[in-house]
Each structure stands twice: as structure tokens, then as C-alpha cells.
Image (cartoon, rainbow, N blue to C red):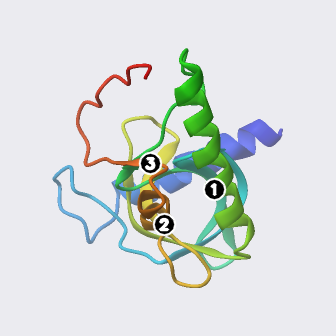
């Protein structure tokens, strides 16, 4: 029964993005936010599973891909890339665990159903993506095809 509720929640959140009356018909549809959320778990260095509250007393569980960054892949064949991915993952876990509440901004649909792309603001007002970028744990990402990571 839990999975049915999860899928309904994802569908509702995706529907909120797709049918935002303030958005235009272009691919740039988004919710400006803030949408309050709490972290359920960190998936990797650029993705968090959250419990979001887009409306009063309504909770939606969804995956959030952090806007503007790309973390190394945890499942890489290269040990150095996996190590870098684990450092980014640990850093993001530490950031979100220190914030009782998170805020999502600039929320848009992603190419993968069930996931959104958003800026994630910590309780103290800092942007999670900027912190990870400044620490050199992730690379900037503006969409499009990602470069294949070569093993150093």
C-alpha cells in the first residue's frame, strides 16, 4: 500500500508542475517556490529524496535533483570516481541532516518521471549546490549531454 501512495504523491507533484497556471506552455514550466521539505534520505551527491509540503497539510514524497550541479557517479567502474562520489554523497548528507527544514526553489520537471530539478536551500539560507561546488565535490551542470568521466 505504501508504494501506491508514493506513486500517487509523485504523480500529484508532477501534475502540480505540469499544470502550473502561472507557467507558460514552453519547456520552462516551473514553480518558483519556496516549497518546504524535509530530507528522507540522500541518494547520491546531487539527489535527495524529500517529503515536500506544496500545499497546507499535503505531503508529497519525491526525488529532487539539485539544480546546477553534477556529482560523480557512485556506480562508476573507476575507484577514484567512486571515492569522489562517496565524498560528495557524505557532504550532502551532512548538509541536509543539519537542517530540520529545507526549501525548494525554481522547481521544474526532470527528464525522468518521478523526479524534479530544484534549488535546495538549507535552514540557514545557504544553497546546497553552491556549497558542494565551492568545496570542489561536484561539477557545474547546465543541462544537455554530460561528458563521460574518464578514470584518472
Crowd class of label 3 (few under 14; some 14 to 19; many from 20; radius 10 Å): many
> The residue tagged with tag 1: helix, strand or loop?
helix
Q: CA distance from mark 2 to mark 3?
A: 10 Å
Q: CA distance from mark 2 to mark 1?
A: 9 Å
Rendered residue at 47%/37% (across/down): 113
Say if mark 2 contacts mark 3, CB within 8 Å: no
> The residue tagged with tag 3: helix, strand or loop?
loop
Would you name the residue on which mark 2 appears?
A: 131
Say if mark 2 contacts mark 1, CB within 8 Å: yes
Residue 22 percent coordinates (x, y): 26, 72
Instruction: Please tell me the numbered disc located at residue 107.
Output: none
Would you name the residue on which mark 1 appears?
A: 91
Q: Is residue 121 above or below residue 14?
A: below
Crowd class of label 1 (few under 14; some 14 to 19; many from 20; radius 10 Å): many
Rendered residue at 73%/46% (across/down): 5
Residue 137 percent coordinates (x, y): 49, 50
Can residue 102 be seen at all in this image of the molecule? yes
- Which is more toward the observer, 64 or 129? 129
| Location of residue 4 (image quadrant) | top right
Q: Is residue 126 above or below residue 42?
A: below
Would you name the residue on which mark 3 appears?
A: 138
Q: Is residue 64 above or below residue 21?
A: above
Amino acid at each position: 500500500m505504501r508504494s501506491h501512495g508514493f506513486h500517487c504523491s509523485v504523480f500529484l507533484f508532477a501534475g502540480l508542475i505540469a499544470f502550473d497556471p502561472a507557467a507558460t506552455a514552453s519547456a520552462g514550466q516551473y514553480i518558483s517556490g519556496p516549497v518546504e521539505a524535509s530530507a528522507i534520505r540522500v541518494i547520491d551527491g546531487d539527489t535527495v529524496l524529500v517529503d515536500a509540503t506544496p500545499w497546507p497539510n499535503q505531503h508529497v514524497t519525491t526525488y529532487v535533483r539539485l539544480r546546477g550541479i553534477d556529482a560523480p557517479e557512485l556506480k562508476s567502474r573507476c575507484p577514484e570516481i567512486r571515492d569522489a562520489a562517496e565524498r560528495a554523497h557524505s557532504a550532502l548528507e551532512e548538509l541536509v541532516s543539519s537542517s530540520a527544514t529545507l526549501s525548494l526553489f525554481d522547481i521544474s520537471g526532470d527528464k525522468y518521471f518521478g523526479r524534479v530539478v530544484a534549488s535546495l536551500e538549507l535552514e540557514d539560507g545557504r544553497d546546497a549546490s553552491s556549497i558542494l561546488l565551492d568545496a570542489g565535490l561536484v561539477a557545474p551542470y547546465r543541462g544537455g549531454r554530460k561528458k563521460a568521466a574518464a578514470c584518472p
